[in-house]
Amino acid sequence: MSSVESFSLEKGRGGGGTGLERSTERITLLRMVFGCAAIGALLAAALFAPWIAPHDPTLDDLFLINMPPAWLNDDLAYFGIENAWAYPLGTDSLGRDVASRLIYGARLAMIVGVSVACLAALAGVILGALAGFYGGWIDNVISRIVDVWLSFPPVLLSIILVAMLGTTLTSVIIVVAVIDWTRFARVVRADVLQQRSRDYIDAARIAGGSDLSILIREVLPNVLPLLVTLFFFEIGIAITVETILSFVSLSVSSGAATWGDMIAEGRRVINEAWWVMAFPVGALVITILGLNAMGDALRFYLDPVLRK
Amino acid sequence: MARLLVTIGSIFLTLLGVSVVIFVILRLVPGDPISMMLPPGATDEVRANLERLYGLDKSIPAQYVIWLRNVAWLDFGMSTQFRLPVTEIILDRLPATLELVLLASLIALVLAFAFSVLAVWLQVDSATLAIDGLAGLAQAIPDFLWALIFILAVTLFAPMMPISGRFDPRTAQDFATNFYLLESLVTFRIDAFAELTRYAVLPALALALPLAAGITRVLKGALEEAMAQDYVMLAQTKGKSRLAIVLGEALRNAMIPTIALTSVQLTFLIGGTVLIERQFSWPGIGSTAISAVINRDLPLIQGIVLVFALIFIMINLASNELYRAADPRLRTVR
Amino acid sequence: MKKLLGPLAGTALAANVAFADDSTLTIAYNVSLPSWDATVGVSAVNPTIQSIYKSVYDQYIDQNPDLSFRPGLLTEWGWNEDRSKVFMVVREGASWHNGDPVTPADVVWSLERAGKEETGNPIQFLWSTLGNFTVDGNRIDADVLRFDPTIFKWMAFLTAYVLPKDYYAEVGAEGFEKAPIGSGPYMVDEYVANSFVRLKRYDGYWGEAPEFETVIFKFLPDASARVAEVETGASDITLEIPYEEYDRLAAKDGLNGVTTPVSDIGMIFINDVGVMEDANVRKAAAHAINKDLIVDRLLRGYGVPIDTLQAPEYAAFTAETTVAYDPERSKELLAASGYSPDNPVKFKIQTTRGFKPKDYEMIQAVTGMWKRVGIEAEIEVYEIAKHFDLRARDALAPAAFYNWGNSIGDPSTSTGFSMFGPSPHSTWDTEDVDAMIGPLWGEDDEDARIAGYQKVDAYIAENAMVIPLLQFVQPIIYRDGLSVTPHVANFLLPQNVSSN
């Protein structure tokens, strides 16, 4: 959270100056390709985890503790295995297969990320749209709540909330969504507020559309490009926050293979088994880079204003 | 004048909201300071007695009213863990956090400035791509991971670099205030300043990198936009070098929107102190907050959350004002 | 912080600007000291902080590194014939860090203060068993209001510190926090909460003068930061680091290591609810755990498997009570209750994470072993605060991992408080065990009391009402040129470190 970009209202960023239009398009294309590749790999790992992963990610083997990745493993006799490539990325301090945990970790990252993004987007869009569309006291109340929410130090609040709700997958998802819905609410509210005064809304009104249908048919489609981008960012944020919570020993327990869990564990054995931490950190960074690149690129393609 | 009053009123209203939310959440969290201090063999009677001593035997609303009444007199209660007034603890630790935040922001600004100007000045695709990539990487790695990477790097490559605390505990610090860094600077004690900076630079850098990346992205965009304006063509025809134009006209025009757009990100940096201070044993309110949560030091958590809230509100206000100033079209909005 | 340090710090600070390295000992310590009142509040009952308290304050009675008792500020103590009175003789020649002598009045005041409810001493229920103090010269006599056979052992345990009566009255509770004084070997020089405390040798100390003039405890809750501190030479000594790191650092040039089993055990509390009311399930769970394998492989040999709540150094330890590793027996027991690996019995197990060495990993290994015999346990990680809350409300999961420190090694402070139903810390509450422990609280024949607890331990082991796992081993890493005497009570006392 602390580190991930605040999206706020940065319009026009990275925008096409006249001289740089062509190179901007090329960079955007590059981003799109990189984003697609990263997210594609992530999705594939998440969906096909049981078929790709060589081992059960939670199965420990105290005789195979901290075994190096296959290409560095020169002591097969000590570990009593014949083929080092049975554990391609080595094992962790409980003898669990790092590669399998990484793959199942992708699955949990997707579950956490997408659920959080959906929940936060749903709450944020509804409240933000209400505030922006109706204004008046509804806007006042919702904006006040947003103000209060934005005044909490997010890391501290998430730690307190997880302490309250317990360390399950569901509670981690709820906590991050509860903290981050304001991101959507603010952006949607500002956009709806701007659109409300446009002519086509008036036209729709005169044509006799109900508030709800105007909101859904006329206003939301215009907010959509921004929402899609935010959605991708939010997935990255959620995965990062899960790591932060693992870091303070407060994330999903029950031995589930989350990347945060692996990083937190690998940190303790970093000098003996760097691979336990290095691979999930790499996966985390590539995923966030991919999501950010994808968000940026999609925004460029979807938003006619940006493309000029 | 009226607007000022409304602003102050809304600050108080927000703080009140924050205090209610945190007060209720804290009392719903399992575990309380009393359970933590019950030794083997304690009876229910002992527990009841301790609850009475710490005022935890009353209902939540009643506890809140008592707390609020005391807060009106700037009395935030006693920390159950440190056994000192919360106000005193916060005043004592806040300077350390503020200095760290200040240094981190400074580092972020310098880095962002250097890289954006470089990118816009060079105007080469490969350079732009490289800087974009670096910024993306700096942003994708959260600050506490940067901190971890630095600590490991120090162990391996630079054992002389300090990784804990604010100064060498073997030396006495004879400063009049708790703003050691600032004080040593304004009193020209260069040796002390250099030594203190050595301790602060790694935690500050860990906090700064993600922010630096954020600012770079915005500033670079703003500079590019500014470079496309007519006055740049005019300056170019006058024979000014490209670098001079970037540093002169373009930067001036890009400054305000950049500050306005990134000041929100500053709140993330400040929120990040909670973890970074703990990792570097930095004696600020962030590390204090974590130990307060672990020990269920309710009055102290409440106090620290309110201080953070006040800082965040101020930054958000300033950011809104700047934004309004930067973009006249937005004046109609809110 | 200096502003908060008052008169004491003022004088001390004026003298020092920089220190020669060989007169300073820097300790990378694992917990932060929050409060200087060693008799009140959360930190008073935190065993890990006691090292710092013991450097600054004296206890009524002290403990040798092997847990045997030795005089502290009291040189003699005991009961009368019928145990209706106690006597204590206060040491002559001890003085507070401000130069005032330690008097019997200080001792009486400390004991009376500890016994008052309004002070907030968490062990108040025990200190209040003494009353009506009279002083004659250096001798204090007091009435036994309620007999407790462990009162003198407690005088070497939590909250048993003597504080200065007059000074405390003069500066008040807050003043004392800012400028604490004691009668121990070191005095507080500068204290920055959550960062460090610097101690100075007190030249007026009554005992043997410690070697180091200056001692710094750096508070570093993060183990990797502590490792980095000793590895880079920023600190001279550290403790409580992962055993992998211990092995690596101990083998390094310039660093040495020492490990010692300490008075702290890891155990799985069993709550007498749900499936745990079935003795077959409990026994199966106990027999399915290969403690030796866990210690050898997971803890790299740094741990002592135990089968009762008594570690070998404790008063009621006996090698006769054992619980064998026997997974086949577990399967039979489970089969008798209708469970099998295909139809496992299910319950929840709670554990801390990163609080004790390999705590979470051990529980993962345990659930792995259980899985093979037909027990499917779901792990939930909880915080320390939540554990205490659940334990006090008797709401722990059917199985819950936690540690149990017992630096005085008495069975009443291990088996007694953890298994006796009416104690708020017991998770197992059944009448059979209560009936066995009940009479032992007031037993004044020490041998009979110990034998009684050994019988209770055997009964508990037989019925698997708790699953003791292991005694923890404390790893200490220190730089060349130092020698360290480890303390079984898990203290890292600067007065026990010297250079050679």
Image (cartoon, coloured by chain):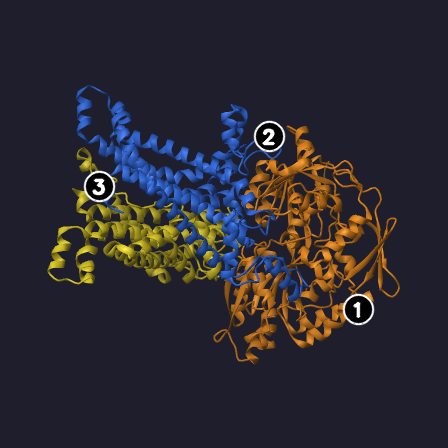
Chain colours: A yellow, B blue, C orange
- Specify which label sits upstream in the sequence, 3 or 2: 2
Disc 2 residue type? Asp
Disc 1 residue type? Glu
Q: Quadrant of the N terminus of chain B?
A: top left
Q: Are marks 3 and 2 on the same chain?
A: yes
Q: Secondary structure at mark 3?
A: helix
Of tags 2 and 1, which is closer to the observer? 2
User: What's the chain of the residue with tag 3?
Assistant: B
User: What's the chain of the residue with tag 1?
Assistant: C
Label 3 to label 2: alpha-carbon separation: 52 Å
The local crowd at label 1, few if under 14, some if 14 to 19, many if 20 or more residues have their Cα within 10 Å, is some
Disc 3 residue type? Arg
Q: Secondary structure at mark 2?
A: loop
Q: Are marks 1 and 3 on the same chain?
A: no
Near-viewer residue (A34 or C84): C84
Q: Label 2, on which residue?
A: B174
Label 2 to label 1: alpha-carbon separation: 58 Å
Q: Label 1, on which residue?
A: C443
Q: Label 3, on which residue?
A: B329
Given the current orientation, which residue lies at the most extreme top position? Answer: B239
The local crowd at label 3, few if under 14, some if 14 to 19, many if 20 or more residues have their Cα within 10 Å, is few
Q: Which quadrant of the figure has residue A97?
A: bottom left
Near-viewer residue (B147 or B328): B328
